Amino acid sequence: MISPVRFSARNFAIGYIALSIAVLALFATPLWFEWTQRIQGARTEFLREDVQRFSDLFRHEGAAGLAAAMDAQVGGRLHGEKLLLLADASLSRVAGNLPAWPAGVPESQGMHVVPIVLDGEPIRISVIGASLPGGYHLLVGRNVTRYRAMEHLFLYGLLGASGIILLLGVLSGWAVRRALLGEVHGISQTASAIVAGDLSRRLAIRGDAHELDILAQTINRMLEQIEHLLHGVRNVSNAIAHDLRTPLAELRSRLEELSVTRPPAEATFAEIESAVADVDRVIGIFNALLRLAEIDTGARRSGFVQVDVVKVAAEAAEFY
């Protein structure tokens, strides 16, 4: 079965980068979600506690007491996390560090996140309003922009980590490609030498548990088998040439003698019969070669006979 994804240094680098970024995302996503939920939950809880505390203070000490407490806590400081505003029925400022009732924030109770310009600087605030007796309105807020620097640092860290992963992926792919090309170059040189006729060449084996040693050993065994087969073919060719040379030489000698001496008809026909016998010997050798080729390829399905293996082995041992 052919794999749909081909192995290459480029695919390796792409896979490494994709996997690393996926792992980074799996780590960062729940962390970011938990951060935002906890910060928002804690901010809402703090605001509700402040609203409840200032509402109780208003019921006990009235508007003047609440205004004095708010001014004592935040005064006129605009830069700070906590933002307070006590307004009258017309939403005019009575106390606190907010200069005016923010646009977009209704008079009713509830939590809102709105952008405002505070001391010439655009920020976003999270506020909770409350209606007090006597037509007064209370607004307690937190500057959410203060956490932007930390959130940006987190995002920049993710981008930096992604950039490092990308760089490492590219460098790893380049290193793998360079290493593979070096190994392929060595294999190519060995193969070129073998093609040129040097059948003794073999691939180098490092012997240090190198990843390509198994491939090199397999190729070397294949080359040894090929060399053995080629030597066998060469020996067979020599044997065939030796077996064919004798009948062909005798055939040529007879024909040459007939051409020179031109004997009587009876002697001529006798030599012709001998020449035909020599040709039959040559044809028999070729037929034997064809049978051997068919046996080697498994194509031959007839012409087999029972033989005495012991007798054949004995004759071969006696011959050699």
Image: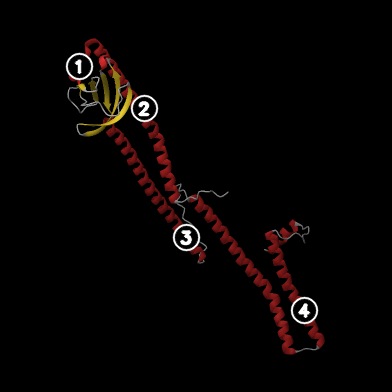
Q: Residue 244 versus residue 220: which sits nearer the camera? A: 220
- Kindly report the distance in space between the C-alpha atoms of the residues bearing marks 2 and 1: 31 Å
Q: Secondary structure at mark 3?
A: helix
Q: Is residue 78 above or below residue 299?
A: above
CB of mark 2 within 8 Å of CB of mark 4? no
Residue at x-position 41% and y-position 50%: 176
Q: Quadrant of the C terminus?
A: bottom right
Q: Nearer the viewer, mark 3 or mark 4?
A: 3
Task: Tell me whether circle 1 and circle 4 mark residues in contact (CB < 8 Å).
Answer: no
Reading the image, the residue beneath label 3 is 188
Q: Which mark is residue 69?
A: 1
The residue labelled by disc 4 is 274
Residue 222 percent across, percent down from the top left? 55, 56
How far, Cα to Cα, is label 2 from label 4? 110 Å
Report crowding for label 1: few under 14, some 14 to 19, many 20 or more residues within 10 A (C-alpha). some
Would you say the residues marked 3 and 2 are in contact, meaning their CB atoms lie under 8 Å apart? no
Question: Could you tell me how far apart the alpha carbons at marks 3 and 1 are, in whole angstroms?
Answer: 87 Å
Compared to residue 297, the image places residue 56 above or below, namely above
Distance between mark 3 and mark 2 Cα atoms? 61 Å
